[in-house]
Amino acid sequence: MLENTIVFALSSSRGLAERICKELGIELGKCKVNHFADGEILVELDESVRGKNVYFVQSTNRPVNDNLMELLIAMDACKRASAASITTIIPYYGYARQDRKAKPRQPISSKLVASLLEQAGAGRVVTVDLHATQIQGYFDIPADDIAANQLIAQHFLDKKDFDMSDVVVVSPDHGGTVRARHLATVLDVPLAIIDKRRPKPNVAEAMNVLGDVNGKKCIIIDDMVDTAGTLCAGIKMLKDKGAKEVYATCSHGILSGPAIERLKGAGLAEFICTDTIDQTEHQKEFPEMVVLTMAPLLAKLIDAVENQSSLGEALAHSF
C-alpha cells in the first residue's frame, strides 16, 4: 500500500520519475524548481509531506552541480516540513569517478557528496551501477545499488531472429570484466576482453583483444559512455579483428562533447543505454540508439521498501 508515499521529480529526471509513478499507480508529487538570474536555486514543495515517505528522483549529470544542489535543497525543504523519511533515488551518481586519491593532494569527491546527502536529510540512497561499488560504503545510511545488466540481457534475449550461436560479449578493459562476464553468463555466450592503456583521462589507446571475435556479433558493455573515445577505439579494434557486427551497451549514456558524432560514425548495429540520464534529444539525431527504462526496477524497489519486503526477491522476479 502506497497511501503514505510521495515521489517527486527534480529537473534532470522528470521523465523517469513519471514512468516510475505510472508503474506504481500513483500521481507524481507536485513541486517547483526555480533557478534565479544569479545562479541560486529554490525548490518549493506544493503539497504536504508531513508524516510521508518521500522519494526524490534526480540524476546528478550535467549540469552536475546544479542538479546536486537542487537535490540537497529539496531534501532540506522536505526535512523542515516534517517528512517521515526521505529517500534519494540518484540513477546516475555524479562524482563517482572521484572515488579515491589517485595521486597526492586529490579530493575524494564521491565521499564528500555522500556526506552532503546525509547532512541534507537523506535516510536512504538508491543508485544504478555505481562506477565504483565501494561508494556504497561511504554512506552511514542504507545504500542500494541497482544493476542494469539483467535489463540489457533481456533486451538481447527478446530480439527476434537474434542468433546467440555467434555472439561474444566484450569487456572494454580489464576493470569491466566482472560486468561483462555476468552478461555473458546470462546470455550463455563466450567472453572477450580488450587490453588497453589510458595515457590520460578520456583518452584510451586500445592494444589487443583477448578472445576470438572473428566473424562474431560482439556486444561491448561498459558502465558509462562519456566522450565515447574509449568505446570507439574498442569498436574499431573489434572490426579490425573481423567482428561482423558490434552492439555497444552501457548503463549511463553521459555522451559529452563529440560523443554522438563519434558513435554515429562508428558503424554500430545498436547503441543501447538506460534512462538514468535523459536521452530525449539524442534519440532524435541517433536512430541506432535504444533506451531501456529503469522505471520497473526502481518502482519495484520503492514498493519493496514501502511494504517492508525483500528487495532482492523483488528485483529477482522483475524479469
Image (tube, rainbow, N blue to C red):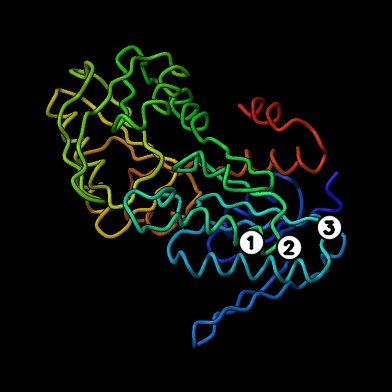
Spot occupied by residue 290 in the image (x, y as percentages of width and height): 41, 42
The amino acid sitting under disc 1 is: Ala
Local SS, label 1: strand
The amino acid sitting under disc 3 is: Ala
Q: Residue at x 80, y 53 (%)?
A: 5
Q: Classify residue 153 as left or right of residue 48.
A: left
The reply to whether callout 3 and callout 1 are in contact (CB within 8 Å) is: no
Question: Which of the two discs, 3 and 2, labels the residue nearer the N terminus?
Answer: 2
What's the mark number on residue 84? 3
> How busy is the neighbourhood of tag 2: few (under 14 within 10 Å), some, or many (20 plus)?
many
**Which residue appears farthest toward the front when viewing the image?**
104
Q: Is residue 233 above or below residue 98?
A: above
Question: Which of the two discs, 3 and 1, labels the residue nearer the N terminus?
Answer: 1
Viewer-side label of 3, 2: 3
Q: Which quadrant of the rendered structure holds the N terminus?
A: top right
Q: Which residue is mark 1?
A: 9
Q: Which residue is mark 2?
A: 29
Q: Nearer the viewer, residue 112 or 19?
A: 112
The reply to whether callout 1 and callout 2 are in contact (CB within 8 Å) is: yes
Spot occupied by residue 242 in the image (x, y as percentages of width and height): 15, 22
Local SS, label 3: loop
Q: Which quadrant of the rendered structure holds the C terminus?
A: top right
* Cα–Cα span, label 1 and label 2: 7 Å
